[in-house]
Image (tube, grey):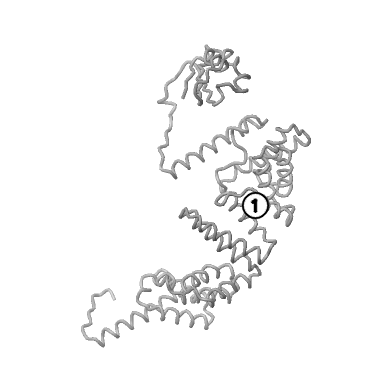
Amino acid sequence: VHGGFFFSLKNEMIFFSSFLSLLCILLIENSQQLIEGCSELMSEHDMITKARREDAKGNLATAELCYQVCTNVYPLSAECFTGLGKLFLDQKRYLDSHVPLFKAFQIENSPQSFALFRSSYELQGQPEMMFIDMGILQFRNGIERQNKSFFEEAKKYFEQALGVNSSSVEAHMHLYELYTTALPDPNRALIHLLTIIDIDPNDPNALYTLGTHFFAKSDYNTALDYFERAAISNPNLGPAVSNRFYLRKRVCKWISYESSLSSLEELTRKELNDDLKSLITSVHPYQAISYPFNPILKLQLARRLAKKEIHKAKMLNLEIRTHSPSTRKIHRRLRVGYISSDFRLKATSYLIQDMFRHHDKENFQIFCFALTPEDNSMWRKRIASQCENFIDV
């Protein structure tokens, strides 16, 4: 093929083309890598015929490969996608069959293709999941295209899923998310969340989400109750364990304080040691300051947060500034900065107004950075007068 052969006669060209098709069929049986180089030499019909022949022989892996190449070369061929989906169905690989059968339905848009697509879920014993998956697809389209009509379509699919199975936790959870984000309706969102608890009183994710709902409303005792239940249902659900401890301190519920602290510290160490998880930890370093954690653990939390922020900056192609001890100026006094939006007529200023004058000025240089404008309050003026460097940013 690569030797520069040239056939000028028509019958020899036909022979040469047939030879290449035969070669391509042989390559299908032996190498996925090589098939991509010659797949364009086979027609859609030839590929499907070859796939069906291999399927009939029981060579399922080869048949699957043929269909996969066919879908890549002919992405608008409903027959290729249908063949691949049916192949998966025959092997009871129902999850694998969903995507190719859905694509076949999108291309063909016929009652037959839809019925086949639906059967892949019915055979799996989860007919409602078809509507849920289609709803998720529309929801993603709505986010990508910033178009509300897709969210409305998603809502219809999720509601159809409930029509098939009213106890579908997934459908209720997706409707909750829809009503809290794209189609805001707090009352409907809460109804779906409470329905999940009725279906499964021990669903940790629903219990945790209910906790966050009541926390946002400053109903801390009710929120704590749901965080307690979520943490009992799933002791490894970090946010629930973390928020449980935080709210126990906030509402002064000291029963089982030591055991809940021990559980939180153990979970935090596990999260820090697990490099496979995301860089996010359940306990924020700012929270940890007020917790009786080991100082080394607090340092590790701060470093993990810094690592997460560096990763985020790289993803956004932002400049990352580093400071080397060898190039940094050496100051005789340790510089301490307070950054706050409460340097004004606020309870915080009332409580700390007299603190700044007690710093050891020989060893510390104090900076206050005010995030709010001048309000001419006596508290702000007193703090500014006692602080060596008061800066309005």
Dot 1: element: helix
Residues 67 and 153: in front is: 153
Q: Position of residue 368 (x, y in %)?
A: 51, 21
Residues 9 and 132: in front is: 132
Q: Position of residue 72 (x, y in %)?
A: 42, 69
Query: For the point 57% across and 17% down, which residue is it?
Result: 379
| Image quadrant occupied by the N terminus | bottom left
Q: Amino acid at mark 1?
A: Arg
The extreme left residue here reads 8
Residue marked by disc 1: 188
Q: Height in image: 360 above or below 62?
A: above
The extreme right residue here reads 255
Q: Height in image: 165 above or below 177?
A: below
- Quarter of the view holding residue 95: bottom right
Task: Please tell me how crowded label 1 is: few (under 14), some (14-19), or many (20+) other residues with Cα within 10 Å.
Answer: some
Query: For the point 49% across and 39% down, which residue is it?
Result: 309
Query: For the point 31% across and 81% down, which residue is it?
Result: 17
Q: Position of residue 372 (x, y in %)?
A: 51, 25
Q: Position of residue 12 (x, y in %)?
A: 26, 86
- Quarter of the view holding residue 160: bottom right
- Quarter of the view holding residue 325: top left
Q: Height in image: 256 above or below 348?
A: below
As drawn, is 216 to the left or to the right of 302?
A: right
Number of dots carrying numbers: 1
